[in-house]
């Protein structure tokens, strides 16, 4: 995350003038044209009495400007263009914080305590549908450890395949795969957009009901088997708000074919080695 720091003198009040710390405008994120406009407007501002941390988001032809001053006060505005965003930020820099009396820091300067950084941890919920197969289900994951764009986390998914035939012309009804996996992912971000490839490995529990071919006969039998499984995905995402993102992309998981229903019954399902799906969901920082 790139920060641009604009330093201008704290000369708007006697208390600010006596401070040894400069007034600070920190642009945490903003489109390039808005960043340039804010820099231009703030450089001409000679009434700075508060520090500001700025975030700007492009939304349907407009810009949503969010600012937090050195005392923690939040300001927000929707503006039509980049120059308007610069003018708004400049005007905010010249207005004392309503919470100034609650802060021990001199007016116009940052408090001694550093601002909290954005959490790099995300929790994700998504749904998926099969590509070329009647598969559907849900997927959830949470980042446990993160560092420099990398994330190590845990995921769980439920895949419903309905009825699947075996090589012996039997039918497995209500086939369901429940997966628990650990994953490694890397997020490469540009502005409000990102790409997030990931690989995962773990266990899958497959359940269903084996319905024997009428020509063979026999009562239904329950299928409940455990196997190893793996998965890979490449998700494309858009950060729509500071703590929210949406994403969409392909995901593939390995599928098991041979199952021992009972010591006397071993079945082989007719399904591909890999189950391809398209997944889409919502993410939130935690």
Image (cartoon, grey):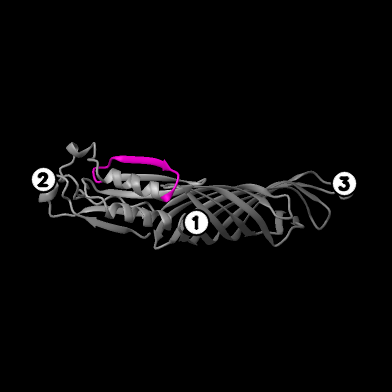
Q: Is residue 102 above or below residue 23?
A: above
Q: Is residue 98 above or below residue 107?
A: above
User: Percent x, y for residue 115?
Assistant: 27, 50
User: Percent x, y for residue 276?
Assistant: 67, 58
Kindly indicate whether the residue at mark 1 contacts the one at mark 3 (C-beta within 8 angstroms). no
Query: Reading the chain from its start, which is encountered first: label 1 or label 2?
Result: 2
Q: Secondary structure at mark 3?
A: loop
Instruction: Single out the mark in the foreground, 3 or 1.
Output: 1
Kindly indicate whether the residue at mark 2 contacts the one at mark 1 (C-beta within 8 angstroms). no
Residue beneath label 2, please? 14
Q: Which residues are magenta?
A: 70-82
Residue beneath label 3, please? 214
What's the CA distance linking mark 3 and mark 2?
94 Å
What's the CA distance linking mark 1 and mark 2?
44 Å
Q: Quadrant of residue 73?
A: top left
Q: Quadrant of residue 236?
A: bottom right
Residue 54 falls left or right of residue 127 = left
Residue beneath label 1, please? 193
Query: Reading the chain from its start, which is encountered first: label 3 or label 1?
Result: 1
User: Percent x, y for residue 45?
Assistant: 25, 50
């Amino acid at each position: 995350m790139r920060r641009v720091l604009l330093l201008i003198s704290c000369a708007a009040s006697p208390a600010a003038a006596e401070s040894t710390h400069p007034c600070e405008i920190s642009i945490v994120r903003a489109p390039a044209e808005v960043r340039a406009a804010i820099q231009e407007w703030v450089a001409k501002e000679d009434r700075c009495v508060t520090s500001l941390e700025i975030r700007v988001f492009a939304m349907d032809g407009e810009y949503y400007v969010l600012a937090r001053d050195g005392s923690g006060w939040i300001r927000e505005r929707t503006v039509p263009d980049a120059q308007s965003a610069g003018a708004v930020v400049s005007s905010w820099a010249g207005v004392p914080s309503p919470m100034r009396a609650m802060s021990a820091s001199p007016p116009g300067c940052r408090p001694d305590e550093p601002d909290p950084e954005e959490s790099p941890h995300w929790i994700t919920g998504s749904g998926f549908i099969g590509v070329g197969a009647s598969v559907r289900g849900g997927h959830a994951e949470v980042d446990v450890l993160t560092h420099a764009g990398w994330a190590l986390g845990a995921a769980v998914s439920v895949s419903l395949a309905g009825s699947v035939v075996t090589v012996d012309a039997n039918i497995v009804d209500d086939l369901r795969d429940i997966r628990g996996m650990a994953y490694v992912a890397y997020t490469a971000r540009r502005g409000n957009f990102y790409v997030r490839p990931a690989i995962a490995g773990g266990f899958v529990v497959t359940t269903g009901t084996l319905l024997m071919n009428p020509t063979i006969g026999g009562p239904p039998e329950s299928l409940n088997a455990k196997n190893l499984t793996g998965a890979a995905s490449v998700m494309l995402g858009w950060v729509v708000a500071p703590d929210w993102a949406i994403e969409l992309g392909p995901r593939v998981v390995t599928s098991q074919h041979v199952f021992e229903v009972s010591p006397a019954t071993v079945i082989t399902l007719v399904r591909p080695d890999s189950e391809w799906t398209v997944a889409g969901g919502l993410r939130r920082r935690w």
